Amino acid sequence: PKPVGRRHRRPGADRKPRQAYSVKQLEQLESEFKVDKYLSVNKRMELSKSLSLTEVQIKTWFQNRR
C-alpha cells in the first residue's frame, strides 16, 4: 500500500540546497527569537539586510524554530 499523507517529488525536479547559516547569522536569529517569536515585516526586512539572507529564509527559520 502507498503511504498516506506523503508527497512525492517528480523525478528530476530541481531543488535548492539547504541553507547553511553562519554562526553570526544563527546568533542574531536566536537573539531575535528570544525577544519575540513572531517578527514584524519591518523587523524581517531589517534582519534580511543585516544578515544577507532573503526575507523568506528569515521567515522560514522562525517558522521552523517555533
Image (tube, rainbow, N blue to C red):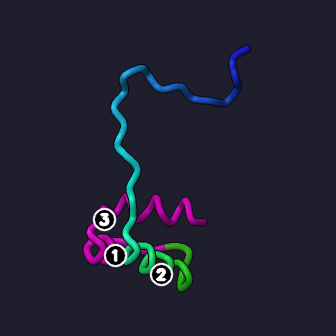
Q: Which residue position holds label 3?
A: 53
Q: Which residue position holds label 1?
A: 47
Q: Could you tell me the amino acid type at mark 1?
A: Leu
Residue 12 falls in image quadrant: top left
Q: Position of residue 47 (x, y in %)?
A: 34, 75
Label 2 to label 3, Cα distance in Å?
15 Å
Please tell me which of labels 1 and 3 falls first in the chain: 1
Q: In this view, does 30 lie to the left or right of 25?
A: right
Relative to 18, residue 58 above or below: below
Q: Where is residue 63 in the image (x, y as percent from the top left)?
A: 53, 61
Please tell me which of labels 2 and 1 falls first in the chain: 2
- Bounds of the magenta segment: 39-66
Relative to 64, residue 48 above or below: below
Q: Which of 42 and 18 is in front in this view?
A: 18
Whether tag 1 and tag 3 are in contact, CB under 8 A, the answer is yes
Q: Residue reaching furthest top?
A: 1
Which of the numbered marks, if any, corresponds to residue 32? Answer: 2
Q: Which residue is drawn at 57% across and 65% down?
A: 65
Can you say which quadrant of the picture contains the N terminus? top right
Element under disc 3? loop
Q: Is residue 6 left or right of residue 49?
A: right
Residue 58 is one of the magenta-drawn residues: yes
Element under disc 2? helix
